[in-house]
Image (tube, rainbow, N blue to C red):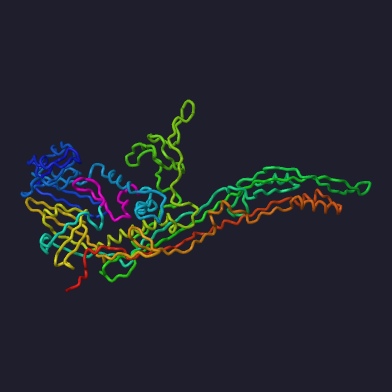
Amino acid sequence: MLYLAFLDAWDQPFDPIAHKKNEAFFSIDSNIEEREDGDVITPFFNVTVQNPGIAWIATQPSRYAVISEQLPDDPEPIQLARGRYHNLPVELAGDDCQIEFTCVPPDEDDVLKAAADAIRLGEVDYDPDADQEDREAAEVYDPLFYSPEATDDPSNALAATMDVWRWNRLTLAPERVHLINGTVQHVIAGATAGTHKSARMSIRNPPKALSRIRLISNWTQSASGDQPTEFLGTREIDTYNYQSFIDGLPKPGTAIGSSTGWTIAAAEIKEIEDLLPQTFGRGFASIWGATGQQIKMQAKRLTIGMRAHYEYNQEREEILDLYMSAGVQPVLDDDKTETVDQITLSSLTLDVVTPEWLYEDPETLEVMHYVVGDKVQANGLVWRCTFEHDATERFTANLFDPDTGDVAQTLWVKTAKQAAVDARTSRFFDMPRGKRAVRHGLRRLNRIVQRRARAGEVSFEVEWKVGRTITCADECRIEYRRWPGGELVGKVIGVQLKIDGASRSAIITLGVSIGTGVEPNPSEGIESTNDILYGVTAPGVNAPVDTYSLDNQGPRILVVENEADTQDGFGRNASESGGDPVAAIAANPTILRIYFEPLRQEDLITRRISAHTQPVYVRKGIDLSPEIS
């Protein structure tokens, strides 16, 4: 007997006795299915029942029901599935009607998103040399591979794992299901696997000899700042033309040279000290003939503080090709390289983890509610919530008292951005943070290759009582003499349970890996992630400017021309030749000449890197070329 019972709540425990009391509402036939079509396995079932009328369906305590059966040799009813009907029956005028159910809990999108969010990991201190266990979470998820809107899609959180999501058709709980290995192995002998007529086997498109993912990283290498120290140091300048020197002191922002990337950050006279006066003779003509006079001139010693500002921007690009060979049995003699994906990473120097501040949810249009610890980006900065509140109409860090104008409540405080790298970096993929991206990319590639290497598809009918216990979380080992090697093992990728009155059938579909089962061999100098062994080939870095040394870089030329001692000479020469020492000194003013090495900027600098794996392990689910004895 097949029963359909509506539940008081979606997670109400299955009660074999209570759920068969209403025998007037028994099922005529049913179809229960689950299949791995994408990255989320969603079981469903439909049931044909005696028509209870729309009024009866509408008065049920919830939209959830459980389907169960009790065969003559079953001691009590067995739950087959539970789910939510997603629309009313199309035809309600006949003696019976069909109701369709999906095996998901209420708010399934939120439930799966919460499960996915638990996997998502932002920017962390990543040590590429740590034990695999310590770096596992960081390599499974890398925010650089996702757009800010990607968190709305729970399926992409598993893109670098060997898992897919599955809704458990008995509990409606989300679970992670491995693509290759099942949690339970069902051993099915030939007698249990139906007749040879029910068995079907085909080889689909296996991976090429080499599979490739291209990763592209673009960023602007930049450095901007004021040097912390004064490049003149304790230098003192003695000059007679101190007033013009002081008046001509450069203002902040004054360029040092032409298009060099250097400007004056600050310039000031810190101290002025009088030097000993010097006496010069000066001759001049008069009505009484040539005569002379003594002139005293006093130089001053200036102590000057001066700091430089640098501004540097260089467009950079790194292209990384990840090549993976798979240890698979030869099916087609194909030595080609196939590019399976090309991914442009998010900006390395921007915060791609912290969401933008929003006033309302763009989907529900409800006002956002922020709790202590939430982080958002607003006005070009990152903020951390310090007081639980509903979003204000406009972003504001503080609420003010309308009477006094004082801060009444602080809502947000500034916090550090979570950028992947320092903007000054000239390289990425062979740096620690870049290695995280490399390994995440290799895991993504491995998922694609392993799924393709599961090229064998086998379907067969099994005994009903065996079939009703099999799910897409399991695997099966089949013994059947007509298959190569006499047996195979594969991951369940499809289950179809059909009930038509007293007739029952269970059709199982397996994805069978056609690997060699050979493990890669670790060796010195080889890197690894999740048993993927690889090596990287990277050229040197074209770095016209050492951005990390700009804080301490001194001027290439620092010359003071015509200091007071030199000006003395010009003045005395003029005196001795009957000239004007004042004019001679004025004609040779003290000059400070500063020149920094230009911060050379080029067009886009591109660097190409490659990584090659050893043949990755692929499960030998079937021997396609067994030895014949």
Query: Given the current orientation, which residue lies at the most extreme bottom position?
Result: 629
**Magenta span:** 150-176
Direction from residue 589 to residue 257 in the image, left or right: left
Q: Residue at x 19, y 63 (%)?
A: 488
Quarter location, residue 595? bottom right
Direction from residue 591 to residue 371 in the image, left or right: left
Residue 154 seen by the camera: yes
Residue 338 seen by the camera: no
- Which x, y percent locates residue 124? 41, 49
- Which x, y percent locates residue 408? 45, 29
Q: Residue at x 57, y 48 (%)?
A: 226
Viewer-proximal residue among 514 and 584: 514
Query: Given the current orientation, which residue lies at the most extreme left position?
Result: 72
Viewer-proximal residue among 604 and 365: 604
Q: Residue at x 23, y 43 (%)?
A: 105
- Which x, y percent locates residue 242? 73, 45
- Magenta region includes residue 168: yes
- Magenta region includes residue 154: yes
Q: Residue at x 42, y 64 (%)?
A: 537
